[in-house]
Image (cartoon, rainbow, N blue to C red):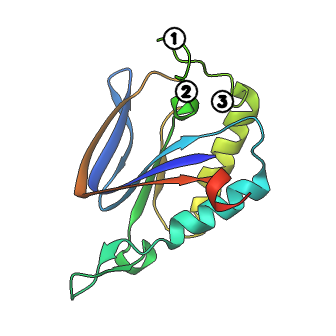
Amino acid sequence: MKIVVQRVTSASVTVDGQVIGKIGKGFLILLGIQGEDTEAIADKMVDKLCRLRIFEDENGKTNLSLADVNGEILVVSQFTLYADCRKGNRPSFIKAGAPDMAERLYEYVVERCRNYVQTVEHGSFGASMQVELVNEGPFTLVLDSEELIR
């Protein structure tokens, strides 16, 4: 599982001209799922994600978590995080999870995030989406289960 975390002051996702998810201060999450991912991996990744202390305290130190700042989460599926660009110029997505399995885990991650914050919005799995954000900092991190867990 790969998660790109962007600390935002606002973010939204639009499908077919309709805003389907919108947040204020918090995290925009781009979530990539590979074939080997499980609910146990998702649990560990969501725990790490939601406990990250990357918001500034009164002294300007990145010391506060989402819960500390009443932050919100917007989760967007992003299978292209598993693009393999080593050969040729056309990416291969063979490592990305099969759609049925990936959608199930995507929905699981969205629900798990609700254990940490009140507002969790999301995109539409498999849809063509337009994502807008105001990245605060900018502050962007990549969490990779192969580095963090295995």
Q: Amino acid at mark 1?
A: Gly
Whichever of callouts 2 and 3 sits on the residue coming sooner in the sequence is: 2
Q: CA distance from mark 1 to mark 2?
A: 12 Å
Residue 143 in the image: above or below residue 85 = below
Q: CA distance from mark 2 to mark 3?
A: 8 Å
Residue at 67% over, 51% down: 146
Q: Position of residue 124 (x, y in %)?
A: 52, 32
Label 3 secondary element: loop
Question: Which image quarter: residue 64?
Answer: bottom left
Residue 3 in the image: above or below residue 56 = above
Residue 147 in the image: above or below residue 117 = above
Nearest the camera: 135 or 9?
135
Q: CA distance from mark 1 to mark 3?
A: 18 Å
Q: Position of residue 15 (x, y in %)?
A: 40, 26
| Residue at mark 3 | 96
Crowding at dot 1, Cα within 10 Å, few <14 / some 14-19 / many 20+, comes out as few
Label 2 secondary element: loop
Nearest the camera: 78 or 125?
78
| Residue at mark 1 | 88
Q: Amino acid at mark 3?
A: Ala
Nearest the camera: 25 or 83?
83
Q: Amino acid at mark 2?
A: Ala
| Residue at mark 2 | 83
Residue at 35% over, 76% down: 69
Whichever of callouts 1 and 3 sits on the residue coming sooner in the sequence is: 1
Q: Nearer the viewer, mark 1 or mark 2?
A: 1
Evaluate if marks 1 and 2 touch, with contact meaning CB atoms under 8 Å apart. Answer: no
Whichever of callouts 1 and 2 sits on the residue coming sooner in the sequence is: 2
